[in-house]
Amino acid sequence: MKGGLRRELIGLAWVGPWIIGFLAFMLVPALMSLRSSLSDDPLLQAPLWVGMDNYARLLTDEVFHKALLNTFIYAGAAIPLSVLLAVVLASLLNTRGLRWKRFFEAAVFVPTLAPLVASSMVWMWVLNGRYGLLNAALSVVGIDGPNWLLEKGWAMAALVLIALWGVGQAVILCVAALKEVPEQLYEAADLDGMGPVRAFIHITLPMISPVVLFNTIAMLIGAFQVFVVPFVLFQKDKGGPDKSAYFYTSYLYDNAFVFGQMGYASAMAWVQMLIILALTGLLFLASRRLVFYRAG
Amino acid sequence: MSENGGKPRAADLSRRAALGVFAAAGIGYACFGPRAGRERTDGRLVLDYWEKWTGIEGKAMQKIVREFNDSQDRLYVRYFATAGIDEKAQIAIAGGAPPDVVGLWNYSVPAFAAADAILPLDDLGRPYGVRPEMYAAGVRQVTTYKGRMLAAVNTGGVLALYYNKAQFREAGLNPERPPRTIPEFDAAAKTLLVRKGDRIERMGFHHREPGWWSFVWGNHFGGSLYDEGANRSTADSPENIAGYDWVQSFPREYGLGAVNEFRSSFGNYDSPLNAFISGRLSMVVQGPWLANMINLHRPDLEYGVAPFPVAESLYEPDRPIGLIDTDVLVIPRGALHPEASMEFIAYTQQQRVVEELSTVHCKGSPLAASSEAFVRDHPNRGIAVFEAIARSPRAFRVPPTPCWAQMKDEMDRALDRVWNLQGAPEAILKRSRERSQAALDLYAANAARRAGAGANALEASA
C-alpha cells in the first residue's frame, strides 16, 4: 500500500466514528425530517404524502404566527440586552485592581452551570406575584410589583430577565477578549488625550467585536430554540397568559409529541432552521462593516 | 508519528496495539455484549408492562403485579414506571418494539385506536368475561371506540365538588347542604369570599384551580364539545356559551387583577399549600384521589363531597353530571403475546384486585357493583358520591376523537382568554370551534386518503 493512501486510510479511520455519527444522527434524520415535512405523519400510521401542504398551513395558522412573533419579541429584547450586559459586566470584571475579582467572576458564571429545570423552579418562586422575592425586594423601595407569571404583559419580561441571569458564558468570553486588547493602544489613546468613554468606544469595542459577534450568533440560535424555561415556568397555563410566553419550539414540540403531527412539526423545524440561517447570514453581512479582525 | 526517520518505534506500536485492542473490545461488547433479556431461567414468558404511576400509586400496582407473578408458573410481568407514557408508547409502537401492556389515560384511547395502534379486546377478553358491561354505566364509555372494546379500566376516576365544611359553617352556610345548582353555588361562593383590603384572602371557588379540566364547564349547562356522529365540534353551542359566560362572571365580579393575584398564592397540588387543603379555596372540583393528599397533609380537614352543581333546569339528584377521568390498560399493536397480555389484564379486573388498587389510589371502583366493605372502609369519605356519578347515565367522557389533544389545547386557550377578559365567550368559543373543526376535517380527509390508498393497493394486488 502506498504511503499516501495509507495515510488517507488512517486519517479516515480516525475521523470515521465522527462521520458515522454525523451520518446516523444528523444527516439521515435531517433528510427523514425533510421527507416527513412533506407528509401527514402521525407517527402511529404510515406517512401520507401531502407535498407542500404543511408549509402552506403555516401561513394561516394563528397559533404558529403568535409563537413566531413571541420568539422574535423575545430574541429582539433578550439578545441586545444580554450582549450589552455581557460587555458591561466583562468591562467591570476587567477593571484593574478590582477586589474580590475571582468571587465576582464566579458569581457571574455559576448561574450558567445550574440545570435549567432546577433554576426555573427557583425562578417560579422568585417571580411569584404574592410571595416572590423579587416583589418583596421591590416593595422595600415602594414599588408594588406585578404578577409576573400571570399577567399577559409581564410574562415575556420575566423570561427576558431570566435570560439576563444566564449571561455568564458570554461575559467570560468577553473578559478573555478584553485581556487580549494590546495595552499600547490605550497608552497611545491616553497620549492623544482620549477619555475612557471614547477609548472604550474606539478601541475596546472594535477589538472585542469578533467575540461580540460570536455571542450574538450563539444567543440568536439559543433564543430561537428557547423551550425549557417557559415549559417549566408555565406548566399550569401552557404558554402563559393568552399564550404570551408560547414560543416556536414549544409549538413544534406540541405538534410532534402532543398532537401527533410529526409532519407539521418537521415543516416547522425546517422553517426554523431557515430563519436562523437567514438571520445569521444577515449578521455576517452586517459584521463586514461592524466587526474588526486583527491581522496576524 | 515517530521522530526517527518515519519508522514507528516499539512504543508507538504497542500504543497502537493497545488502542486497537480497546476499540475491538468496545465494538465486540456493543455487538455481542449482554442484553436486557426477556427470558427467565424458570422458562416463564416475560411480559413488559409500562405504567405511568410512581409513588404510592406505583407501589400499589407493583404489589398486584407481584401477586400475579406469585400466582403463576407460565407468565412473569415486569413493571416499568414510565413518565410521558403517551409519547413513549407511541414511539415504541411506531418503532415496532412495544411493551406487552400499557397503562394509558382514557382520553388517549381514540387516538391510538383510530391508528390501529392498540388491539381490540372483544375477542381476547371474552374467555375471561372482560367486556364493557362489567363497568359502571358512565365508565363503560371510555372502554370503547367506534363500537369496539379497546381498553380495560382498573381504577375509577370521576370529578365532583369538594367543599370545606368548617368554612361553610363559619360563613353561615349549611355544611350538610352543599350547593346543587349554579345560582346556589354563586351565592355560596360570594358568602365564602374573604378580602383584606384590595387582596383576596379566601375565595369560594376559582375555575383555574387546579386548571386541568378547562373544558368541562359547558357540560354543567347541558352542553358538550363534540358531536361524534357528525364529527363536528360544538364548542360554541348556546349551552357552552352559557357555561363560559358563567366562568367569565367570576373575574368580572371579583376583579381580574385580584383573582389572578390571589391565584399566585396557590401552592403545589400535592403539598400542604394546595389551595383547597390550605383553606384558601372553600370549594374545588377534583377527583376522589384528592383525599389521599388531604389525609397526608391535613387529616383534620373537615370536607364534604357533592356532584358539581348544574344549571337550575338540569338538576336531577338521581342523575348527577360529572366527567369520567380514568386510567386504562391496553395491549399495543405489535405485542408478541396478546393472549398472555390479556390474561394479566383480566387478573387486574377481578373485583378484589380492582378494589384493593382503588382503595390505595383513593379512587372509586370502575366496576358496575362495589362491595359494601369497599365503600365502608374507603379513605375518601365522599366515595359514595363518586360512585353515584360513575353510575349515572349523565356522566360524560372527553370527546372520543383522535383530535382530542388539539381540541383540548383550543379549550385551554379559550378558557384562558375568557378568564382574562380577552373577549366575549361567544366569539372566543366560535374561534375555538373553527380551529377544532379544521383539525377534525384534516384528520378525516387524511384518513379517507389513507383508506383510499389501502383500497387501491388491495385492488392492484388482486
Image: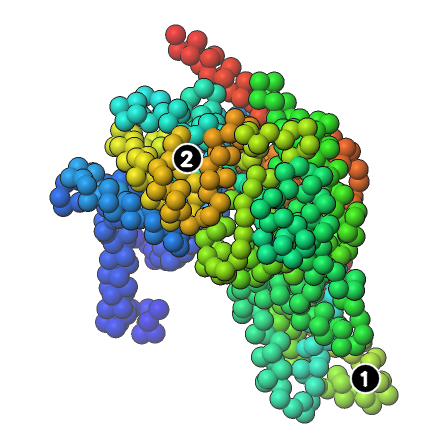
Subunit of mark 1?
A: A
Q: Which mark is residue B328?
A: none
Front tag of 1 and 2:
2
Q: Secondary structure at mark 2?
A: loop
Residue B445 in the image: above or below residue B94: above
Residue at the disc numbered 2:
B366
Residue B402 in sight: no
CA separation in Å, label 1 and label 2:
77 Å
Amino acid type, residue under disc 2 in the picture = Pro
Residue B319, image x, y percentages: 55, 29
Residue located 72% across and 51% down the image: B191
Subunit of mark 2?
A: B
Taking depth in this image into account, of B351 and B39 the one nearest to the observer is B351
Taking depth in this image into account, of A93 and B312 the one nearest to the observer is B312
Residue at the disc numbered 1:
A196
Q: How is the image coloured?
A: rainbow
